[in-house]
Amino acid sequence: MKQFNTAKKLLLASLIGVASSVNGQTITHPLAFASTDPGVDSPNWYRNYVGVRVEVDAPASIAGDKTSTSAIIGTGTDDWPNIVYTNLYDLPIVMPPASDSFFASGLPAGCMAGKIAVVWRGPMTGTGVYFVTKAYNAQQAGAVAIVLINEYPGAEPITPAYVSGYGTVTIPVYMIGNADGIAIRNQYMADTNSVRMTITNWGHDLTNDLGFVPGGYALWHNYAIPYDQITPINPEAYKGLDGAFIANYGTNAAYNVTLSDSLFFTPDGSSTVQIHAGSENFPGPFNSIDSIYAIFSNTEYNVYSSDIPASTPGRYDLKYNITSDSTDLYPGDNSATYSFYTTDSLYSKGLYNFTANQPFVNSWRGGGADFIWGPMYYVAKGGASVSDIQYSIAENTTTAATPLSGNSNVYIFKWVDGFIDSSSGTPVDYPMDGIVQNGELQLAAIGDYTYGLLPSDTSEGILNLRVNNITDPSGLISPYYLILDSNSWYYFAVDPGSSTTLPLFLGVDNVLNPYPRVYGRYYNNGIMDYSNIQNGFAESAISTYDMYGCLPLAGSLVGTIDSVDSFNYSSMIGLIPSVAVVVNKNPPRLAVNNTVKPFADVNLFPNPAKNELNVSLQLLQVTNSVTYTVIDGLGRFVSKETHNNVMVDNFAINTTDYPPGNYYLIINITGKVMSEKFTIVK
């Protein structure tokens, strides 16, 4: 079982102080967040940024921070902890024997005493072993912590979940990714005494120790994008911005702290080309009290190079490095590399598995009520059509392969910055202000995925909405080859549907953190960099903030983008919806036989409405159920109701509490979907 989280609105903001910088912006952080956890030395102002770090200390060839997830804290008295109250410094590791590498059986008491147990997650086929069983066995053998390795090739860590009744676990439990785990295993097999690890909620208690905050370096616009989108003149959305959140984990102040950055491109089957190099210097002092600084470049740059062969997919590697006047006593966290890709026809914000041809999904977010959420993609060069939309829905169950029932909708909105009020004909919003506001999202296409058609339609499985299930908003054209326009933003919003018994969740990558880029771009030049659209999840869209622009931070409603806020930072780690889009660069022309009769004759009146909207619907035949969903002009869920045994339907929607603005009524019957737009005026 993996992680399911119900996101909460975060309304906290804090102040910004600016320190001097030579080449880049250096932003000091206020002392705002003291730790209240028992056993943690207080004040530790920045633990909410850093979280727990799982690190390899030796050998140097594999040293550094490892991407990790911590076990879920449950509600029972025997649930395991995931907070390190006492840091575990530079301890040897121990792995179970090859005959029991998944640790299904216990070992003699004391054989792991004082060591960190490193154990495989479990077999990819056959009967697995509960995480709690492995943790309990390690604890009984004397281990002080257990680090699980995800055994799936190339996979990132998932979140270990607790199953009761298998023993009380008091040691901390973590998981790391497959590549890091293999490197540790190989080194351990060569020399069982060579690998040492640290698990800490801050640093190593050293004098001179700078390092990246985990997940704290600026990413690029996408993880994957079609190669023809990279042109000599990059649009603003595709500009590179170098910067990172850097911590002084040591006890001494640091001086002349330099963040160096280099971007390389390796075309498939060809040699590497350097695209960009830069550095940002902070003279100091980089205090050990104000111990996290945001260092960002003042300038942005194009990721295009004339040295890149035309029409060639490949991999970009953005490499960061930290240096200072002092010799760093733990250099393992001074370097970081982030990779992104140009492909033939794929858009993906989150991590993508190119071997399985599907997005990485390591956690699910949402739940508790109906919600709508997804990524924003910028299209520099139009002309392609939407072919497939890939995503994952999960129920909060202990069995991943539980069959899903019902359906999910995908709404494709085109964002037009600035709009004309259809009821009054007057301009609303200042054109090109860079903020998504009510009325600026135009519903361009809509898709219905009915669960149960394929064996893979299960909780936590990957769903693939094909173009055959995409229609224009009115339901007149199916399949609908939506042609994406040049220089345009598109919002791919997933409505997971609803379950009669369990909350539903949308898959996220659980690794990448869009916050540093969003924060850096806004602080430098006021650009809203949309990785996804802010979503209140289990909270109604009907609020006094209806006309407030959607911010590119899921989980935040009124917090400012440029706030140095550890809660915003930590809540954004991994919070990129794993919704990938495949396009067809040679879409067929719209044929006459694509035009179909809509499945329903719908009339909304009065439109515009004030306190009540009447709905009249006529179907061609009786259907078991019709679901009516109202979403607002920001693509947010408003209401839903289902009517059974329907052929003719007449009813009213109470809109008294609806703020003024644009809305859509989404109508679903089995395997079919259409929409009608209406306006509320007051």
Image: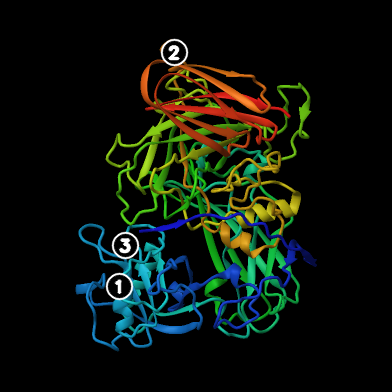
Of the numbered discs 2 and 3, the one sitting upstream in the chain is 3
Task: For mark 1, give the secondary structure.
Answer: helix
Q: CA distance from mark 1 to mark 3?
A: 15 Å
Q: Tell me where residue 321 appears, x and y as whole percent.
A: 60, 67
**In the image, what residue type sits under mark 3?**
Glu
**In the image, what residue type sits under mark 2?**
Lys
**In the image, what residue type sits under mark 1?**
Lys
Side (left or right) of 229 relative to 436: left
Vertical arrangement, residue 350 with respect to residue 18, above or below: above
Residue receiving disc 1? 134
Residue receiving disc 2? 597
Most foreground residue, 395 or 318: 395
| Residue farthest top in this picture | 592
Q: CA distance from mark 2 to mark 3?
A: 50 Å
CB under 8 Å between discs 1 and 2: no
Can you see residue 514? yes
Of the numbered discs 1 and 3, the one sitting upstream in the chain is 1
Vertical arrangement, residue 26 with respect to residue 540, above or below: below
Residue receiving disc 3? 151
The residue carrying pointer 1 sits among few (fewer than 14), some (14 to 19) or many (20 or more) residues within 10 Å by Cα, namely many
